[in-house]
């Protein structure tokens, strides 16, 4: 049994591995090495595509001249100003109603 792991065997092509003559341990190392290389390639491709998407988003927002964060903060300021104006109008309406009731 021990000789089976150290003897040279012929392995047919499988997946991305070509036909080879190797030991079980050498062939397993080849499989693991190929998987590690493919995983690294996928990871690099994913990072590249994520950076590309972010770059396109930045170019789109700068090209349109709209900064989402700035517009949101302006909207909040306007919303607060509208609420304050509504309170002023409601108070003025109450005062006029009170004056009208007195007369």
Image (cartoon, rainbow, N blue to C red):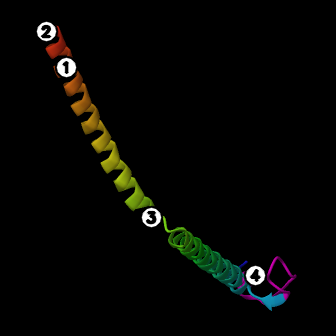
Q: Residue 4: give its label.
A: 4
Q: Give the quarter of the figure containing the N terminus.
A: bottom right
Marks 2 and 4, the one that precedes in the sequence:
4
Label 2: which secondary element: loop
Front position among marks 3 and 1: 1
Label 3: which secondary element: loop
Q: Position of residue 32 (x, y in %)?
A: 66, 79
Q: What distance separates the C-alpha of mark 3 from that of mark 1? A: 43 Å
Local crowd size for mark 2, using a 10 Å CA cut-off: few (<14), some (14–19), many (≥20): few
Q: What distance separates the C-alpha of mark 4 from that of mark 1? A: 102 Å
Determine which quarter of the picture holds residue 6: bottom right
Residue 15 sits above or below residue 82 on the image: below
- The span shown in magenta is 3-19
Residue at the spot of label 1: 96
Residue at the spot of label 3: 67
Marks 3 and 1, the one that precedes in the sequence:
3
Q: Position of residue 77 (x, y in %)?
A: 31, 50
Label 1: which secondary element: helix
């Amino acid at each position: 049994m021990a000789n089976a792991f150290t003897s040279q065997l012929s392995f047919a092509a499988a997946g991305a591995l070509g036909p080879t003559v190797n030991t079980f341990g050498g062939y397993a190392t080849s499989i693991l090495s190929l998987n590690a290389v493919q995983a690294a390639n996928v990871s690099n491709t994913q990072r590249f595509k994520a950076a590309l998407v972010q770059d396109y988003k930045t170019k789109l927002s700068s090209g349109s001249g709209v900064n989402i964060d700035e517009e949101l903060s302006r909207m909040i300021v306007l919303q607060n100003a509208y609420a304050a104006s509504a309170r002023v109008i409601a108070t003025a309406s109450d005062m006029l109603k009170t004056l009208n009731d007195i007369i």
